[in-house]
Image (spheres, helix red, strand yellow):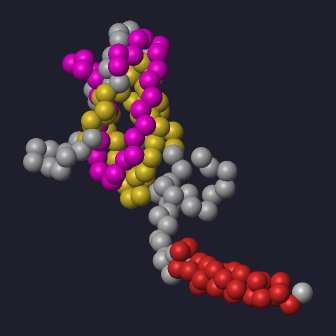
Amino acid sequence: MRHSRRRAGPIRRTVAAVVLAGVGAGPAACGAETRYANAPRPPVPINVTAAITDERVRISPRSFGAGPIVLIVANQSRRSHEFTLETASGPGGPPGIRQTTSAVNPRGTAELKVDFEPGSYRLSVRSQGVRPAAIRVGKARPSAQNELLQP
C-alpha cells in the first residue's frame, strides 16, 4: 500500500496545480472587468397612411416624432402612380432620403418602411395635376426599451 501512495502523490499535485491555474485564469478569460454600454431599443414603429386622389396626396397624421414608421399608401385615383418620399430640404441642404415605390395600380396599395430623422419631407407622384403632401417630423419618440412583447 505504501507503494501506491507514492504514485498518487505526484498525480494529485499535478491535478491540484491544473485546477488552481484554471481557477486563476477563469475570471480573466471571461472578461469580468470589461463593461459594455447597451444601446436603447428604437421607438415602436407607427403606421402612417397616405392616399392619392386625382387632385392631391393626403397623409395622416401629417406630423409625428422621429423614428421608424411604416407608410402605407393607397392609390385611390384613376391612374397608376409611383409614390416618392423625399426630404424637403432646399438646394445646398444636407443629404436626405428618397424612396420610390413601383407603379401602384388604381385601388392598389404599397408600403414603405422608413426611419425618419427630424425635418420636413414630401410625399408626391410624378403626375403634374396631383399636389404633394407635406410631412413634419419632430423630435425622436421615446425608446421602446421597457415595453414588453415588442418585435
Left or right of residue 87, residue 19 in this image: right
Towards the viewer: 86 or 29: 29
Q: Look at 49% across and 76% down and name the residue there.
A: 35
Q: Judge whether 53 appears above or below 150 on screen.
A: above
Q: Residue 7 falls in which quadrant of the image?
A: bottom right
Q: Residue 123 falls in which quadrant of the image?
A: top left
Q: Look at 42% across and 18% down and name the residue there.
A: 75
**Residue that extends furthest to the left in the rendered view of this protein:** 92
Towards the viewer: 115 or 59: 115
Number of marks drawn: 0
Tell me the magenta residue range: 102-130
Q: Is residue 77 visible?
A: no
**Residue that extends furthest to the top in the rendered view of this protein:** 78
Residue 67 location in percent, x, y?
Answer: 43, 51
Q: Is residue 10 visible?
A: yes
Report the quarter where the N terminus lies. Answer: bottom right
109 in the magenta segment:
yes
64 in the magenta segment:
no
Towards the viewer: 39 or 12: 12
Q: Look at 14% across and 49% down and name the residue there.
A: 93
Residue 73 location in percent, x, y?
Answer: 44, 27
Q: Judge whether 20 appears above or below 141 on screen.
A: below
Residue 52 location in percent, x, y?
Answer: 39, 22
**Residue that extends furthest to the front in the rendered view of this protein:** 3
Towards the viewer: 109 or 49: 109
Q: Look at 48% across and 77% down and name the residue there.
A: 34
**Residue that extends furthest to the right in the rendered view of this protein:** 1
Residue 28 location in percent, x, y?
Answer: 53, 79
Left or right of residue 129, residue 69 in this image: right
